[in-house]
Amino acid sequence: MNIAYFVFKHIHIIITHIIYVLQFLLLFSAVCFSVNNSTVSIEVLTGSNYKKWKQYIEFAMGIADINLAMISDRPADITNTSSIAEREHYAKWERSNRLCLMAMKRSISEHLLGGLPETNDAREFFAAVGERYQVSSNAEAGSLMSELTGLRYDGLGGVREHILRMVHLQSKLRA
């Protein structure tokens, strides 16, 4: 029983990894990685998809349980008098910071990385990307409005899906 469970668990993990690799190879628009037995996929930042990229980054870092550097300040440097708990927290934060930076930098198009500041702090880097590529709310509202007014039922899908799409766009406009 234990051997069967062990084999099944590892086959499931391998299949999950293969699926993510295939998605990456087919789409070329996502970065996949595995941390703490969690495989996550992040859409590549192209400059115009910042809002979606930000959601992917926050979700992926949370799922992989490496978002400590994104949600907390850098802890005080370790000294000879630091307790074991402080040393462990510092090591955890350093690992989180390093992995978050790597994941963010790998998920940004090569030509966009040159315009971003070099920093070793994931939180600062995330904020710098936000300042650089954040879409203004007026531009986004204009885009949504033109999409909503130009949306016509094409007869291919169901009427229900068309109405739900319109309601979704309208709710995004209100937000």
Image: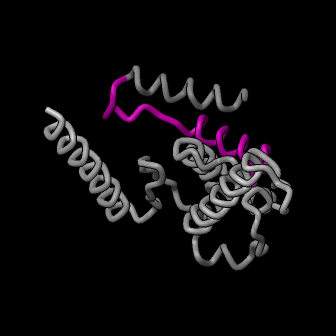
Mark yes or no: residue 51 visible: yes
Residue farthest along the top direction in this orientation: 160
Q: Quadrant of the C terminus?
A: top right
Between 174 and 150, the residue placed more toward the observer is 174
Q: Residue 87, position in %: x, y?
A: 73, 54
Q: Residue 57, position in %: x, y?
A: 60, 51
Magenta-span inclusion, residue 77: no
Q: Residue drawn at (59%, 41%), measured in percent from left and top?
A: 147
Q: Residue 162, position in %: x, y?
A: 44, 27
Magenta-span inclusion, residue 149: yes
Q: Residue drawn at (38%, 22%), measured in percent from left and top?
A: 159
User: Magenta region: which residues?
Assistant: 132-158
Q: Residue drawn at (26%, 53%), measured in percent from left and top?
A: 14
Between 78 and 155, the residue placed more toward the observer is 78
Between 10 and 103, the residue placed more toward the observer is 10
Q: Residue drawn at (50%, 29%), measured in percent from left and top?
A: 165
Describe residue 166's horizontal placement relative to residue 50 as left or right.
left
